[in-house]
Image (cartoon, rainbow, N blue to C red):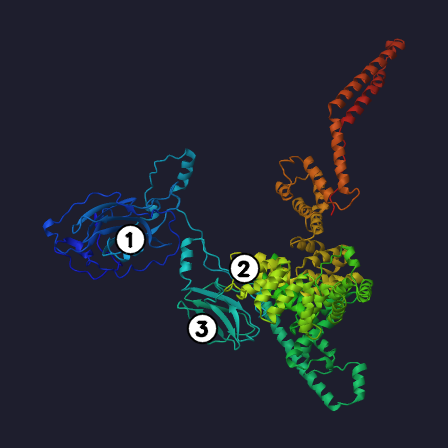
């Protein structure tokens, strides 16, 4: 038995001397009557769930024993003080621990006893509570025996019934006294009751580690097999899986363009609860080290440029936030626990054009972070070192050309002869350079391009001269690619494209990346392809960024699979796409889904002098509203092969809006007037037209009225009214605008921001094809900060990719390839479709594969990759890939292609996917594979929703496939599917006839008649002939007479054999 007194850490008032009748160590726990303790002490820092099924209901008087008075009645008039003291008979935690509580009450009181435990995951958890009253025995020391029962999970080891015992760090048993008539209710909470204690005490119990505890006798017998299995596992000590506290942010270089996009990473939680609890405790006091490899081209052009942010779920910046300043210093910002922000600036300057490692430590340790992709990093460094020389040469040339042009203008300002010479003569060129022969030999293509350049076209602005000269070098090089044998010129123009790339014109960088990655008339070099793709992405070249995003999205061409990195590239271009469409500048065209296999769509492609365009123009002139609208759209967006001409489009919009009553034309012209696109702004006329179109029930016009009141009148109530009406009519723009109101917290009648409701409206707008709504959804998916948008990086990439692929600069490349194909210029068509296909857009990939099928000689000669295999294979991994691409890949897997061997399993998967898309050829090919003996796996049948229990044999599956093939066939008359279905049923009918009982009976009957006739014939022959003499007998007679009887029997047996036919092979 161990006696416990006041322990460590329990706050109490200053000890006073006990009354005279108190004896022994009880005085240490006595406090004056009516005293109030100062507090309850601090809680442990742990913060995870410990127990979920504990008995916390206090027992009232159960398991008690009678108490006896120890004070004489004659001395009860003495002023007694309340005290409480208890003794634990066992010093450690047991299932039932016996506690002796001795106390004295000066007035009616309530005695409270509680057991509290703490672990690594949670602190101060009550596991036992008990209270009882004392109203009669006052001024008398009494003793109460209490049996404290602890949960089995903290007393016993794990067994078959106790699966998860817990490790307890501290167990406190505490008791206190409160006076009953102090204005408090009996059912007051324990915490409030403890605050009004007049006397209290506590003790600590020793805990036992989980693997030193005894097993519990459950009084239950297990089955022998369960008991045997448990005995095999009983003495095994579980080990937590190894979890590294080092998180890899990047495994491949990221080309940052310095714009408002970047990589979004979310640190995973620890699976181990102790590690996760420690991590959560350190949120306010972080201890970590960040290590980054950087290669900076220039310092920040704005005030601060972000390198690393930590953003919490409330979209607030945490610790750390690392910025780069204009001077090259690091600006590090931290958020303190007190709510204040602290910022520091380094004393050192970050180096430029040199790889360096930046380590930022907050009391953390060192990190092993070697430079990955060393070869690529070295190539990047060599590229920018060479480009520094090129830029210096071009800059000096531009300066010399500028001064030479100024001297000519100053000397011959009004010389008419020189004006005519400049207009009609050969361009003036610079014949001398101030550079040494060694430098000229090092950059021959650059000096050749500068010699051939017109001095009058050199830009006068020194800052823009290098990039513009690079653009002129690029245009000259591309002009050579447009010739009849343009692909043959690639190897000779690569040096010019390299110089153009060094000048900062990064369309050339993308061309070089594609040439090296595909081996387009140059030796295939994936390292150089990566280099120029990264250079183009850093220069914000749209096609380069899309190429990088696509390669990381699929994890192909030695690019690692990284959806966060892919999102960083795609989101950059997706953000620019709506802006590009509204600028109406640059080489842009509307991205159209035009497949080279679709002859009907190809027939309607036209130009300004084409039949389709001329017919539309004729009808529009006559006042046909539909023709006017279509003609205006073609000219405004550059659709259907027509060059972009916004001025001409606006004329047709105005003509249709003012002469006809077509609401769509009225709305389009109103938008043009509002925004001033190609015409002077006229807000008054635009509003009249918008109201007129809205009165005709056009939902776009109703949304436009809401936009007017939001943008120009700031009347959010009226704007919301129109947007709600348009949203009910199915307008996606209205859904997006309502989301913006909720996001900004200005929706009428709704206080504050509501991101959840805004996200719902953005999602509805995205489903209707709204670009900005789709961008918001992709952002929510990559961050995962909304419950309705759980973090899904892959889905974020898909949504951002969908918007990026509508970019007008990509549409311009696709249109050039289509025009070249229609004109029969195979070299140019192959070039531009390769450029478009490498960005990851599916329609260009299938079109390129189609061109390679039409001209295999061209593909084999100029491409270093298997064109048909590569791009059909790329296309089938896209979302909404066409069914014919699956059929083509199924054929390639079935027959084998070049280095690819036959793979029937993958062939079945491709045909099944085509069938699921509703292509009858997919069902037909699957049926042919079954007839050849191929077994279709059950998961493929489930994929096609064919119940394997109803169709248990191949004949039944064949019938189902041929019936579906027939139902999905577009041909009204007999089709291959219907003929195959009919042939199958004829075979089944013939087989049933051959194996029927009637045929067996008839065959037996005819055979009997034939045998009887044969016997009778031989008997008649033998009776008519004279008896043979023995000397003339010959064995040939028996042979000749027996032969007729054998032939019919053999014919009959052959007739019973089933017919074997040759089955056709599957085709695409």
Mark 1 surroundings: few (<14), some (14-19) or many (≥20) residues within 10 A = few
- If you read the primary sequence from the N terminus, does the residue marked by circle 1 or circle 2 appear first? 1
* In front: label 3 or label 2: 2
- Closest to the observer, 125 or 817: 125
Residue named by callout 3: 343
Which residue is identified by label 1?
A: 185
- Residue lying furthest left: 74
Say which of 214 and 484 sits in front: 214
Dot 3, crowdedness within 10 Å: few (<14), some or many (≥20)?
A: few
Mark 1–mark 3 Cα distance, whole angstroms, equals: 53 Å
C-alpha gap between disc 1 and disc 2: 45 Å
In the image, is 251 to the left or to the right of 702?
Answer: left
Vertical relation: 1028 (above or below) 193: above
Q: Which residue is mark 2?
A: 757
Seen from the viewer's position, the closer of residues 383 and 738 is 738
Q: What x and y, as percent, mark residue 22?
A: 14, 54
Where in the figure is residue 237, as x and y percent of width and height?
39, 46
Q: Position of residue 279 (x, y in %)?
A: 42, 59
């Amino acid at each position: 038995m161990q006696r416990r007194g006041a322990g460590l850490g329990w706050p109490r008032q200053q000890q006073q001397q006990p009354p005279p009748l108190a004896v022994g160590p009880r005085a240490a726990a006595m406090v004056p009557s009516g005293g109030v303790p100062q507090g309850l002490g601090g809680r442990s820092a742990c913060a995870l769930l410990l127990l979920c099924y504990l008995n916390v209901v206090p027992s009232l008087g159960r398991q008690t024993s009678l108490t006896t008075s120890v004070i004489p009645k004659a001395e009860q008039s003495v002023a007694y003080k309340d005290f409480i003291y208890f003794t634990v008979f066992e010093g450690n935690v047991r299932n039932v621990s016996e506690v002796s509580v001795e106390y004295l009450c000066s007035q009616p009181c309530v005695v409270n006893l509680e057991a509290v435990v703490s672990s690594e995951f949670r602190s101060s958890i009550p596991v036992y509570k008990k209270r009882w009253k004392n109203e009669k025995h006052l001024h008398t020391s009494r003793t109460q025996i209490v049996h404290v029962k602890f949960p089995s999970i903290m007393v016993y080891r794990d067994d078959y019934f106790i699966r998860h015992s817990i490790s307890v760090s501290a167990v406190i048993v505490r008791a206190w006294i409160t006076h009953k008539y102090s204005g408090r209710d009996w059912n007051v909470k324990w915490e409030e009751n403890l605050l009004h204690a007049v006397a209290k005490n506590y003790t600590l119990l020793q805990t036992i580690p989980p693997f030193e505890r005894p097993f519990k006798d459950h009084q239950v017998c297990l089955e022998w097999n369960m008991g045997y299995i448990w005995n095999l596992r009983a003495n095994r000590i579980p080990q937590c899986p190894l979890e590294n506290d080092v998180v890899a942010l990047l495994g491949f270089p990221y080309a940052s363009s310095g714009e408002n996009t970047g990589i979004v990473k979310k640190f995973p939680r620890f699976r181990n609860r102790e590690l996760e609890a420690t991590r959560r405790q350190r949120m306010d006091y972080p201890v970590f080290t960040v290590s980054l490899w950087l290669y900076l081209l220039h310092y920040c052009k704005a005030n601060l440029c972000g390198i690393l942010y930590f953003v919490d779920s409330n979209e607030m910046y945490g610790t750390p936030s690392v910025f780069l300043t204009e001077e090259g210093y690091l600006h590090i910002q931290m958020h303190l626990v007190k709510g204040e922000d602290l910022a520091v600036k380094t004393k050192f300057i970050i180096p430029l054009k040199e790889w360096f490692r930046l380590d930022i430590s907050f009391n953390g340790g060192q990190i092993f972070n070697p430079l990955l992709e060393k070869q690529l990093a070295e190539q990047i460094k060599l590229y920018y070192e060479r480009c520094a020389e090129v830029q210096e040469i071009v800059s000096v040339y531009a300066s010399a050309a500028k001064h030479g042009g100024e001297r000519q203008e100053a000397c011959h300002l009004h010389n008419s002869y020189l004006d005519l010479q400049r207009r009609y003569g050969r361009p003036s060129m610079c014949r001398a350079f101030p550079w040494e022969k060694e430098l000229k030999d090092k950059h021959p293509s650059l000096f050749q391009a500068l010699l051939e350049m017109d001095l009058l076209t050199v830009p006068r602005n020194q800052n823009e001269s290098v990039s513009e000269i690079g653009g002129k070098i690029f245009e000259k090089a591309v002009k050579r690619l447009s010739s009849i044998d343009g692909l043959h010129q690639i190897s000779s123009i690569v040096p010019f494209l390299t110089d153009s790339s060094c000048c900062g014109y990064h369309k050339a960088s993308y061309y070089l990346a594609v040439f090296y990655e595909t081996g387009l008339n140059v030796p295939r070099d994936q390292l150089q392809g990566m280099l120029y793709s990264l250079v183009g992405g850093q220069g914000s070249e749209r096609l380069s960024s899309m190429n990088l995003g696509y390669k990381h999205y699929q994890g192909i061409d030695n690019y690692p699979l990284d959806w966060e990195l892919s999102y960083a590239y795609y989101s950059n271009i997706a953000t620019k796409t709506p802006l590009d469409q509204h600028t109406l500048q640059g080489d842009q065209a509307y991205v159209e889904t035009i497949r080279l296999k679709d002859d009907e769509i190809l027939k309607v492609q036209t130009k300004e002098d084409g039949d389709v365009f001329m017919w539309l123009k004729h009808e529009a002139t006559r006042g046909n509203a539909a023709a006017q609208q279509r003609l205006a759209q073609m000219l405004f967006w550059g659709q259907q092969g027509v060059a972009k001409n916004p001025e001409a489009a606006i004329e047709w919009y105005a003509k249709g809006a003012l002469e006809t009553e077509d609401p769509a034309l009225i709305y389009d012209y109103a938008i043009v007037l509002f925004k001033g696109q190609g015409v002077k702004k006229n807000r008054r006329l635009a509003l009249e037209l918008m109201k007129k179109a809205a009165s005709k029930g056009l939902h776009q016009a109703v949304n436009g009225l809401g936009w007017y009141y939001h943008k120009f009148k700031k009347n959010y109530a009226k704007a919301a009214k129109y947007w709600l009406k348009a949203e009910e009519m199915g307008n996606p723009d209205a859904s997006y605008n309502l989301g913006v109101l909720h996001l900004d917290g200005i929706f009428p009648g709704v206080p504050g921001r509501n991101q959840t409701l805004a996200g719902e409206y953005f999602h509805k707008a995205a489903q209707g094809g709204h670009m900005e709504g789709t961008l918001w959804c992709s952002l929510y998916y990559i961050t995962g900060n909304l419950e309705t948008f759980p973090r899904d990086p892959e889905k974020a990439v898909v949504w951002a990719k969908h918007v990026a692929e509508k970019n007008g600069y990509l549409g311009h490349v696709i249109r050039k390839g289509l025009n070249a194909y229609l004109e029969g210029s195979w070299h140019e068509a192959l070039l531009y479709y390769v450029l478009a296909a490498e960005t990851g857009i599916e329609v260009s990939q299938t079109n390129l594969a189609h061109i390679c099928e039409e001209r295999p000689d061209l593909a084999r000669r100029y491409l270093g990759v298997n064109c048909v295999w590569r791009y059909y294979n790329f296309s089938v991994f896209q979302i909404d890939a066409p069914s014919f691409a699956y059929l083509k890949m199924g054929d390639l897997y079935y027959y084998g292609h070049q280095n690819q061997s036959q793979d029937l399993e993958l062939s079945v998967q491709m045909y099944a996917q085509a069938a699921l898309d509703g292509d009858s050829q997919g069902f037909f090919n699957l049926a042919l594979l079954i007839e050849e003996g191929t077994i279709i796996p059950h998961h493929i049948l489930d994929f096609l929703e064919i119940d394997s229990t109803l169709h248990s044999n191949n004949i039944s599956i064949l019938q189902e496939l041929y019936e579906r093939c027939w139902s999905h066939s577009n041909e009204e008359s007999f089709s291959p599917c219907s003929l195959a279905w009919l042939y199958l049923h004829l075979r089944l009918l013939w087989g049933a006839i051959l194996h029927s009982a009637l045929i067996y009976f008839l065959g037996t009957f005819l055979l009997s008649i034939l045998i009887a006739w044969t016997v009778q014939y031989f008997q008649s022959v033998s009776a008519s002939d004279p008896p043979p003499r023995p000397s003339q007998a010959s064995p040939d007679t028996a042979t000749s007479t027996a032969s007729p009887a054998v032939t019919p029997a053999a014919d009959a047996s052959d007739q019973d054999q089933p017919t074997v036919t040759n089955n056709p092979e599957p085709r695409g």
